[in-house]
Image: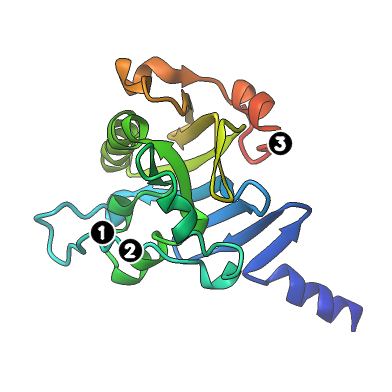
């Protein structure tokens, strides 16, 4: 009986650990902080097969249907909180919408608030966006890219949601690893995305995440 219960917990789509909860969706896994109310780590795989450009057959348009994650509904009903900071912050995707343009269900899932971080407008719409576009190009050329991203720290509160101080992304492909660490500031766009190249060690130190699945 104990083994049976253990297996049920192990296979669950929602796993709790102190202040965070890990939720498995169709294309991505998010580890969401229930105190800060943003994801500290999101993981997915980009591949050439799931990159659909606007002219590709079956391309799914961006839905913009931001909503609570049904697997963490009470905690992630954050629409009104984000409205309070809408003059300064966007609802920034971790796993971006364009990575889900081949499947309508995946597109809807990526708009859960468990996949959102308050990002300054210049970060979300310029510097972070450029890194997202680079990642998709890399997926097309390398065929497969593992992606980890998240945020840490705090600058201010937007309703109940904490705006992080830094947003990070790690890419692993063909035996190579690239890491990026960007300040969540209004002037982040003064430099191109590659200016913010970092190391896994620096991200580990700042985020306090083990990131044991990334060996360097």
Residue at 75%, 72% (x, y): give it. 9
**Residue 28 appears anywhere in the view:** no
The image's colouring method is rainbow
Left of 178 or right of it: where is 50?
left
Q: According to the image, label 2 marks what residue? A: 107
On the image, the x and y values in percent for residue 62 come to 24, 59
Query: Relative to residue 7, is residue 106 depicted above or below?
Result: above
Q: As drawn, is 29 to the left or to the right of 87?
A: right
Q: Spatial distance from mark 2 to mark 3, Cα to Cα?
A: 29 Å
Q: Which residue is mark 1?
A: 101
Specify which label sits upstream in the sequence, 1 or 2: 1
Q: Is residue 159 visible?
A: yes
Q: Position of residue 127 (x, y in %)?
A: 32, 28
Of residues 30 and 144, which is closer to you in this image? 30
The residue tagged 3 is 210
In this view, 95 is above or below 191: below
Q: Secondary structure at mark 1?
A: loop
Residue at far bottom of view: 1
| Residue 187 vs residue 212, the one in the foreground | 187
Q: Nearer the viewer, residue 187 or 99?
A: 187
| Contact (Cβ within 8 Å) of mark 3 with mark 1 | no
């Amino acid at each position: 009986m104990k083994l049976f219960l253990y297996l049920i917990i192990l296979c669950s789509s929602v796993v709790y650990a102190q202040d965070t909860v890990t939720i498995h969706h169709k294309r991505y896994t998010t580890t969401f902080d229930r105190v800060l109310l943003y994801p500290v780590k999101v993981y997915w795989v980009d591949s050439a097969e799931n990159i659909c450009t606007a002219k590709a057959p079956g391309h799914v348009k961006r839905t913009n249907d931001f909503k609570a994650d049904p697997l963490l509904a009470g905690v992630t009903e954050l629409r009104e909180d984000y409205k309070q900071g809408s003059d300064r912050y966007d609802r920034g995707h971790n796993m971006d919408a364009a990575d889900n343009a081949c499947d309508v269900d995946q597109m809807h899932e990526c708009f859960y608030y468990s996949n959102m971080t308050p990002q300054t407008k210049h970060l979300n719409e310029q510097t972070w966006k450029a890194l997202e576009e680079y990642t998709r190009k890399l997926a097309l050329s390398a065929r497969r890219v593992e992606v980890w991203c998240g945020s840490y720290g705090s600058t201010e509160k937007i309703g109940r949601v904490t705006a992080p101080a830094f947003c990070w992304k790690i890419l692993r492909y063909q035996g190579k690893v690239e890491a990026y660490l960007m300040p969540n500031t209004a002037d982040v766009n003064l430099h191109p995305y590659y200016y913010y190249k970092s190391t896994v060690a620096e991200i580990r130190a700042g985020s306090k995440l083990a990131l044991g699945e990334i060996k360097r």
